[in-house]
Amino acid sequence: MISAISQRQVFNVNDLNLWYGNNQALKNIQFDVNENEVTAIIGPSGCGKSTFIKTLNLMIQMVPNVKMSGEILFDGKNILSNKVDLVELRKNVGMVFQKGNPFPQSIYDNVTYGPKIHGTKKKGVLDEIVEKSLKDVALWDEVKDRLNAPALGLSGGQQQRLCIARALATKPEVLLMDEPTSALDPISTMKIEELVLELKEKYTIVMVTHNMQQASRVSDKTAFFLMGELVEMDNTEKIFSNPEDKRTEDYVTGRFG
Ligand SMILES: Nc1ncnc2c1ncn2[C@@H]1O[C@H](COP(=O)(O)OP(=O)(O)OP(=O)(O)O)[C@@H](O)[C@H]1O
């Protein structure tokens, strides 16, 4: 049998611990992310999924009294060292949240927000970024005639796709998605799932989801968290059909959680 070609790893998380004050929320996490794959994070409420995904672009540091130990290598460099440039990191590791949270500005200004911060000023270049980013999320045809209309006038599903376009506009390498469809109807959810499958051709995606069917539909790898620990991480098919750990099996078969 020909062995699989080993893929480049974008993140290597080694022995990560995290405390909110005295309360330990993540324990000895080992977590690798392959390039151009979708990695899903599942687990019951309060197990540390959101906390963990927010460590990958250090958004977690916005929470007061957070302490971390261990290392998070992004493209081989430890982002927990003091030398990291946060603006650069968040340009390369974009994030999309549970509820589409467009700024109360036009569709156009939402997409150009990031590129402008990073110094892109020319109208022609910004126009191109807007068109490309909106095409990437399959929103261009729906909004191309009203780019100056308020983003908040879009439907929930369109707002979420706009937020993905906003994250893509700075040309990130990784897209973090924290329960991106939990506030959406089934059709909008399906569109986002289709989009995720297309986007992984160009981007690496890490996604928290409560929805196990969603994890099995869109992800290559699945990580199961429980009480701050990473119980098991493997190919999605294996996690859902033949996991190593009894706790994973109980969770994916609906015996708890
Ligand atoms: N800002 C915070 N300050 C203190 N403790 C927090 C904070 N955010 C989360 N926690 C605690 O950290 C633990 C993990 O929470 P987290 O939100 O990461 O879990 P989760 O798996 O994403 O949950 P859910 O699925 O309900 O969103 C919980 O015990 C939670 O109470």
Image (spheres, rainbow, N blue to C red):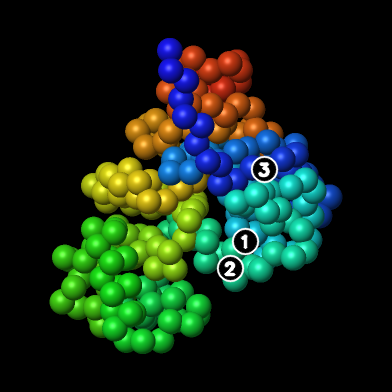
What's the residue type where badge 2 is placed? Answer: Glu
Q: Which of pointers 2 and 3 lies earlier in the amino acid sequence?
A: 3
What's the residue type where badge 1 is placed? Answer: Met
Residue 92 position (above or below residue 213): below
Residue 58 position (above or below residue 229): below
What's the residue type where badge 3 is placed? Answer: Val
- Please state the horizontal and vertical placement of residue 199, each as a whole percent of the image: 35, 50
Q: Residue at x 47, y 61 (%)?
A: 172
- Please state the horizontal and vertical placement of residue 114, each as a whole percent of the image: 46, 74
Q: Residue at x 44, y 76 (%)?
A: 115
Q: Nearer the viewer, mark 1 or mark 2?
A: 2
Q: Which mark is residue 59?
A: 1
Q: Secondary structure at mark 2?
A: helix
Q: Which of pointers 1 and 2 lies earlier in the amino acid sequence?
A: 1
Residue that badge 2 annotates: 88
| Quarter of the rendering containing residue 154 | bottom left
Measured Cα–Cα span from mark 3 to mark 1: 16 Å
Q: Secondary structure at mark 1?
A: helix
- Please state the horizontal and vertical placement of residue 162, each as a whole percent of the image: 33, 65
Q: Residue at x 28, y 75 (%)?
A: 128
